[in-house]
Amino acid sequence: MNDSFDPFSDVASLQLAVTDSFCELAEQTVKQNGVFRVSLSGGSTPRRVYEMLSERQLPWDQIHWFWGDERNVPHDHADSNFRMVHTALLSKVDIPAANIHAVPVNVDAPAEAAEQYEQTLRDHFDEPFPAWDLMLLGMGDDAHTASLFPDTLALGEQNRWFVENWVPKFDGFRYTLTFPAIESARNIWMMTAGEAKQQALKQALKQVLSGETDLNRYPSQRIKPTRWFVDAAACGAA
């Protein structure tokens, strides 16, 4: 956990803090290593972060963009995480196409698409697991993170970096990083906002505070964020 767990008063304050912290970390990392590699989260909270990032001055040609999860829909579909990030950020700034590493969705063959993206990651990262400079995550009201949903097969994957994950509640596949690939990040930031997230946050914090875990029901319990970005509404039952 970060130095304190004082919640932000509202989601707008949280989003501004994430944006400012992102810029600071990106600039510092590029100065030190010449590159900044980030895995992105979907959802409404990070969308505003991406919009604000598009208004900042950053070393765009030295930042590489990856996705922690994706829906099994074409990139131009309204539900696509890629489309959301492209609309909010990527289309607004001068980012080299080679720096944008979108999940190659194949609606009819999700296993093939997942294998292709895993190979993209392995080609980019010359390490046992991808050492992201930053992993941006959110938490669903069922305590899922990325597309690691309760009671799904991907929760037990220990060797693959990226997989297709059948999610019964949606009667469909999602694409997702696995736990080992997420945990390899140098910085893991968990963004959680809104009253609907109260019980999920409460369960996640059980692992942090007492070591109690039920990973099949509450996948986020496995994640150990280096920073929490939580608003007061989500903390109501935590």
Image (cartoon, grey):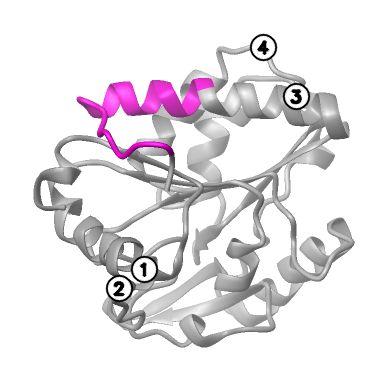
Q: Amino acid at mark 4?
A: Gln
Residue nearest the viewer, comparing 2 with 229: 2
Element type at mark 3: helix
Badge 3 vs badge 1, beta-carbon distance below 8 Å: no
Residue at 37% from the left image edge and 65% from the top image edge: 220
In front: label 3 or label 1 = 1
Label 2 or label 3, whichever comes before in sequence order: 3
SS class, disc 2: loop
Q: Nearer the viewer, mark 2 or mark 4?
A: 2
Whole-angstrom CA distance, mark 1 to mark 2, is: 6 Å
In this figure, which residue is indicated by the disc labeled 3? 60
Can you tell which quarter of the image residue 233 is in? Answer: top left
Q: Position of residue 46 (x, y in %)?
A: 42, 37
Pointer 2 with pointer 4, Cβ within 8 A: no
Determine whether label 1 and label 2 are within 8 Å by CB. Answer: yes
Measured Cα–Cα span from mark 4 to mark 1: 35 Å
Residue at 42 percent across and 34 percent down: it is 47
**Does dot 4 land on a helix, a strand or a loop?**
loop
User: Residue tagged by mark 1?
Assistant: 221
Q: Is residue 238 above or below residue 178?
A: above
Between 45 and 128, the one lying in front of the other is 128
Is residue 75 shown left or right of residue 93? left
Q: CA distance from mark 2 to mark 4?
A: 38 Å
- Queried whether the magenta region covers residue 5, the answer comes back as yes
Q: Is residue 170 above or below residue 133?
A: below
Which badge, 3 or 1, comes first in the chain's sequence?
A: 3
Mark 2 Cα shell of 10 Å, populated few (<14), some (14-19), many (≥20): many
Which residue is under mark 2?
218
SS of the residue under disc 1: helix
Q: Tag 1: Cα neighbours inside 10 Å, few (<14), some, or many (≥20)?
A: many
Q: Is residue 160 visible?
A: yes
